[in-house]
Image (tube, rainbow, N blue to C red):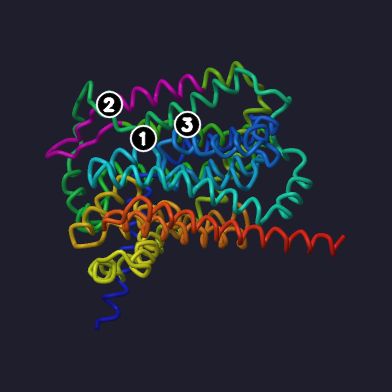
Amino acid sequence: MDWGSTILTLLQGGLGNLASYLAAHVLLCLLPAFFIAGALTALVPKETITRYLGPHAPAWVSYPAAAIGGFVLAVCSCTIMPLFAGIYKKGAGLGPAITFLFVGPAINILALTYTGVAIGMDIAVARLVLSLVFGIGIGLIMAIMFRKSEAEREAANGSAAFGGKGSGMGGRTWLFLGLLLVVLIAGTLQVDVLTNSYAQFTLPISGLDTLQATLNRLVPYDASMGQEGVSVQGLLLIVMLALIGLSAWKGLGKVDEGYNTWTWVALGLTVLTLVVAAVRLLPATGGLQVAITGKMIAVTLGMAALWIVGARAFDAYEMQSWLWETWRFVKQIMPLLIVGVFAVGVIRGLIKPEWIQAIAGSNTVLGNLVGVVFGVFMYFPTLVEVPIANMFLGLGMHRGPLLAYLMADPELSLQSILITASVIGKSKAWVYVGWVTLFSTLSGLIYGAWVDGASLAVLALYIVLTLGVLAAGLVWTSRRQAKATKVQS
């Protein structure tokens, strides 16, 4: 074996995966999510979050609210992370926050629709029902297991360190958050009115077709293997993203002390980059075709409305708080995301799809665990994970392990684990990983048994027995914690 060539190939896979990710997923989905997380922390009064998602909110209110919030937002796991961090830091209870984290990427509207069209509505419905049930279940379990530490967090986090003023959430804040959501949805939703082109022109820039051919060799495109490639537009966006980072380090990192030149440079570059990301750029012989899409129009109008509302409805301190909190989330999450995405690209080169197929061709515990582990090391965004799942289905993977993979892939990717640990702590994060692994495996076994012809009565018995064992375990854990607390007091 030529180790030098192998290492070079793995490094190329990691760098290629990172480049593809930055070009395709960071801008129109992740950047708006960071700004939303910053707004949740800085502008939304803590009482508003804790009223519906807080540890003292009725469970019949908080958990459905968290699940519905995750369902409505058509985001993948990378985008849900800053939103999860935002509501948790603001005072949401651990249980509802975990439910939001689990349900969001697993059953968002885009994922369900795409799964149903590409693989079958049966697996899409199974994914919906089991994700809702197990998402709420995992949230409840985490809340019970860590109620003591959560009580200590609640006592220590009596007020926001750099939050907005006032105790009520007025119409201006709702409008501002709504406009941020408009920018996020307009940039990610795949509907004709947004993806269609309404005008087109050509810039006389030569050599870009040659550059695109070079990028295709360096970072290949192969949807069946989850390789997204990098376009000329993607390369331009990566450069602009780097410029945003450099300017934001001085402009947003010190915005709590007041606006400076770098602040306006960073904000201007952010607006320009989002606009460039929303147009369609196609290299051609002798020029660059620029198509004005509905996405670009919607994103531009959304950002213009944000600027007007921010300038007229909020004072300078509140906007500085928003930008400072946004930058804090970027610093916390982006380094872990970059490391995780690079590592996944390297690991992907070591795992052969044939290996997965060979041991996941039947609905066994091992086969479903393989599907879960595959989701950890082979993370793909929503629009890629479904073709990958379809590929493995064609190779002979059983539909049970396939569902286990689809349940685990958005939740247990390497970068998601790293970021979750940075938000809620390592011990809670690894317990969460354990529960997601268990429930994803169980989901695959239950659905696989149904595919193999098991009766609904048998499936219901499986679920009841599982819930009974879990309930007994929780009661035992609760009593042990109560005794430990009594001894300490």
- Residue ID at (36%, 64%): 368
x%, y% of residue 88?
A: 62, 44
Q: Tell me if 291 is positioned left or right of 40 in this view.
A: left
First reached walking from the N terminus: tag 3 or tag 1: 1
Q: Tell me if 84 is positioned left or right of 182 in this view.
A: right
x%, y% of residue 82?
A: 53, 44
Closer to the camera, 382 or 459? 459
Residue 380 drawn in magenta: no
Residue 440 sits in quarter: bottom left
Q: Which residue is mark 3?
A: 268
Task: Locate the C terminus and report the quarter of the image it occupies.
Answer: bottom right
Q: Determine whether the residue tagged by mark 3 lies in a helix, strand or loop.
A: helix
Q: Residue furthest left?
A: 285
Q: Determine whether the residue tagged by mark 1 lies in a helix, strand or loop.
A: helix
Q: Tell me if 481 is positioned left or right of 227 in this view.
A: right
The residue under label 1 is which amino acid type?
Thr
Crowding around mark 1 (Cα neighbors within 10 Å: few <14, some 14 to 19, many 20+) is many
Residue 9: tell me if it is visible: no
How far is the residue under mark 3 from the one under mark 2? 21 Å
Query: Of tags 1 and 2, which is closer to the observer?
Result: 1
How far is the residue under mark 1 from the one under mark 2? 13 Å
Q: Which residue is mark 2?
A: 293
Q: Which residue is mark 1?
A: 188
Magenta-drawn segment: 279-306
Closer to the camera, 378 or 212? 378
First reached walking from the N terminus: tag 3 or tag 2: 3
Residue 396 sits in quarter: bottom left
